[in-house]
Amino acid sequence: MRTSWGSATDRGSVREVNEDALLTFPPVFLVADGMGGYDAGDLASRIAVEEFAALAGAVGVGVDQVHACFTRACARMRDEFTGGRQGGTTVAGAALVEVDREPYWLVFNVGDSRVYRFSESGLEQVSVDHSVAQEMVEAGVIAPEQVVTHPDRHVLTRALGTGEPPEPDYWLLPAGGGDRLLVCTDGLVREVSYDELARALAADDGPQVVADRLVATAVARGGRDNISVVVVDVLPVAALVAEGASTAPRGRWG
C-alpha cells in the first residue's frame, strides 16, 4: 500500500499569526494547533512537528515510537518556555503501520484537533476531543450537536507542553484501500459542518484539491481561527501511479 496526500493551511481572516503547523511525511501525517500567542503557540506547534519529523521514512513505527515524539516535544517546550512564558499545542494525526503484514492507521490525539476517516460506510470521527464540552457530552449534560456552539468547546482538558506529562489517546484502524483520512485543526470544523466535510471527502478529487477546497471554504465562511488540513488516501501502488498523485513530503508552519 502507498499513500497519496494533500495539505493546506491558512491563518484565517482574524488571527494575525498562524500558530498551526503540519507534517506530511510518510509514515506520519499530523496537524498541531499552537496556544499561547505570538512567539509561543507557533513555536510549540513547530517543536511538535520537528520531533515527529524524526519518524519520517521510518519502518516499524508503533505506539512507543510515537509516544517518544510526544515526550521529547514536551521536554523541549519545558526548556523553551521559562520566565513566565507559556505555550502549548494540540497534536492530532496518524501513522501508517503494519500489523501481521497488513496496513493499519495508528491514530493519535491530544487536544481538540481531529482525525476523521471516510470510507464506503461514510464519515466517522475517530479522535475524541479533550475539551470541557466533550466531557459534558460524555456525562450526558449536553447533546453532541451542542458542542459546536457551547461556550466551553475550546477549553481544553489536555494539551502538549502545558506542564503535565503528555497524555495522548491512541486508536488502531485497518487501512483499507479507498479509505480517506482527514486530519484538521479546530479552525476547520468551526466553519464547516459535518455533512459538508462528508461531501467534500466523498468527491472524486485528489487529496490536494480536497484540502485546498476545505481551507478555502473555512476562510470564506469567516476564518475565525487558523485552519490546517491534511487529507490522506491509501492506494495500491498501481492506482497511485495511474492517478499521478503527488507524494512530495511537506512540513509547514506559520
Image (cartoon, rainbow, N blue to C red):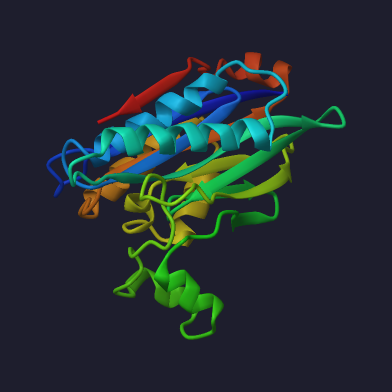
Instruction: Choose between 159 and 199: the one closer to the eye.
Output: 159
Q: How many labels does the image show?
A: 0
Identity of the residue furthest to the front in this view:
83
Please tell me which residue lies in front, 108 or 236.
108
The structure residue drawn at horizontal position 42% and vertical position 35%, both measured from the top left corner, is: 75
Residue 97 seen from this side: yes
Q: For the view shown, which residue lies furthest in the bottom direction?
A: 141
Image position, residue 111 (x, y; %): 44, 54
Q: In this view of the protein, which residue sits in the foreground, 71 or 108?
A: 71
Q: Position of residue 25 (x, y in %)?
A: 51, 21
Residue ID at (50%, 47%): 166
Position of residue 60 relative to residue 222, above or below, is above
Left or right: residue 119 compared with residue 68: right
Can residue 203 be seen?
no
Query: Where residue 97 sits: x, y (%)?
Result: 71, 30
Residue 148: quadrant of the picture: bottom left
Which of the 4 image quadrants contains residue 73? top left
Q: Residue at x 29, y 74 (%)?
A: 151
The part of the image, by quadrant, that contains residue 125 is bottom right
Quarter of the figure with the N terminus? top right
> Going by the image, does 182 lie left or right of 84?
right
Against 138, is 3 above or below?
Answer: above
In the rendered view, does 23 fall on the left or right side of 46? right
The quarter of the rendered structure image containing the C terminus is top left
Going by the image, does 24 lie left or right of 218?
right
Residue 159: x %, y % from top left: 41, 52
Please tell me which residue lies in front, 4 or 49.
Answer: 49
